[in-house]
Amino acid sequence: MFSSLSEKLESAFKNMRGQGRINDLNVANTIKDIRRALIDADVNFKIAKEFTDKVKEKATGSKVINAISPGQLMVKIVKDELTELMGGTESPFNISGNPAVILIAGLQGSGKTTFTGKLASYLKNKKGKSPLVVAADIYRPAAIDQLTVLAGQVGVEIYAERENKDAVSIVENAIKHAKSRNKNVVIIDTAGRLAVDEVMMTEVANIKAAVNPTEILFVVDSMTGQDAVNTAKAFNDRLDFSGVVLTKLDGDTRGGAALTIKYTVNKPIKFMSSGEKMDTLDIFYPDRMAQRILGMGDITSLVEKAQEQYDEAQANRLEAKLRKNQFDFQDYLDHLQQIKKMGNLKDLMGMMPGMGSMMKDVNIDNNSFKKVECIIHSMTPQERANPDLVNQPSRKNRIAKGSGKTVNDVNIFIKQFEQMKAMVSAISKGGIPNIAGMPNFPGMKRR
């Protein structure tokens, strides 16, 4: 996510390094590179120029304060402006009402239905709500089936009328159903098209008029760049939606939509989504996103994700074992299971300050940990608690056969375990491990 933009901005800041003072010349060179980086990221030229003009105005003539170098000062100025460009602060999500009605709109293929399932999961598991999802897409044959599957995955009820071709009446009936079943949130998945057309816009506008939604969320495929921004403007002119959802942020997105959609339609980004798993939905924080774009990490989000998976007692036990160098195979297995629940491993490591640029040429395959799990599950409880025992050839042979792997696979795993043990220990003590200088971990491949 935003890797190309991050790399080009980092290159732009090199003009300021080693300078004792910000001056017109090094500011001009840096501003030119920043503007080029933004345009390459599919940011509209007018917006890129206005952004860099603001940065130039704040940077020109500024003196180095205390120990802050010109490069650091420029990074701060750009971070502040990026944060403001993307909305400034987190935008509240209104789920008041009985029931609260949330209308989901967007083009076909933008990820509306998947987001509907994710939002239902978020509201149920993190907000304690009882949501009802409504299949109001009467055109796409598989839309009801897809939403039915997703609703089943997250354990929420779905309302659908397969034979009814009047989307407005379906939604009105769904609201009545929700009230009768004590559902306090109704999420409406509307129809989309491959392009904006009058039939679709009229239908979604009629649904809005009929149910008066608490929130209207426009779902944007972030990989479509400025096309997504232009579509958002067309929808906003008709719907006056309350917020934007950015999907497919795990893809090869250049970042233009995320950076400029707030500026263009003056509506906040409320959620961002990546992947197909139902738990990969996050609140959008402009300041945290700006930090990640600039390679500063996002330690706040990382800590929040960890807190969702670890209870305090469990974390304290793990930390104590790490400090005493007693980290064993069972701890390793438990730790991997918790990390996997937090999300994509490469994205998680990218949230650590200083790690973003180090991870750009590294691929991590989450599925590769299955081999590790098979090997550990083939050990006895005694072996899991005493890693030194596994160095015996007879035990290695038995573990290899039991896991369906080779002795060489077991040897590689033991070496990787020692490396992971050192890395996790360094992190627990507040350090940042030098991944570039260490051999590969499970699933890690350098390009």
Image (cartoon, grey):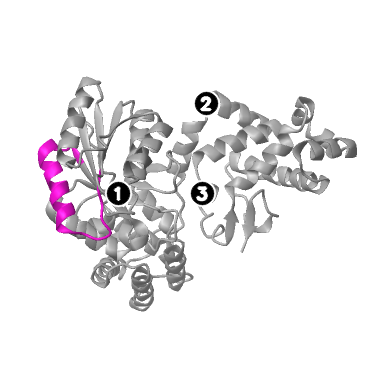
Q: Which quarter of the rendered picture does the C terminus lie within?
A: bottom right
Choose between 321 and 440: the one closer to the eye: 440
Residue 203 percent coordinates (x, y): 15, 48
Task: Check if residue 239 falls in the magenta segment.
Answer: no
Q: Which residue is mark 1?
A: 140
Q: Which quarter of the rendered picture does the N terminus lie within?
A: bottom left
Choose between 311 and 156: the one closer to the eye: 156
Rounded to the nearest angstrom, the CA distance separating label 1 from label 3 is 42 Å
Q: Secondary structure at mark 3?
A: loop
Residue in the picture at 64% in, 57% down: 445
Q: Which residue is mark 3?
A: 352
Q: Quadrant of residue 84?
A: bottom left
The mark nearer the N terminus, 2 or 3, is: 2
Task: Check if residue 213 falls in the magenta segment.
Answer: yes
Residue 24 percent coordinates (x, y): 33, 77
Q: Which residue is mark 2?
A: 312
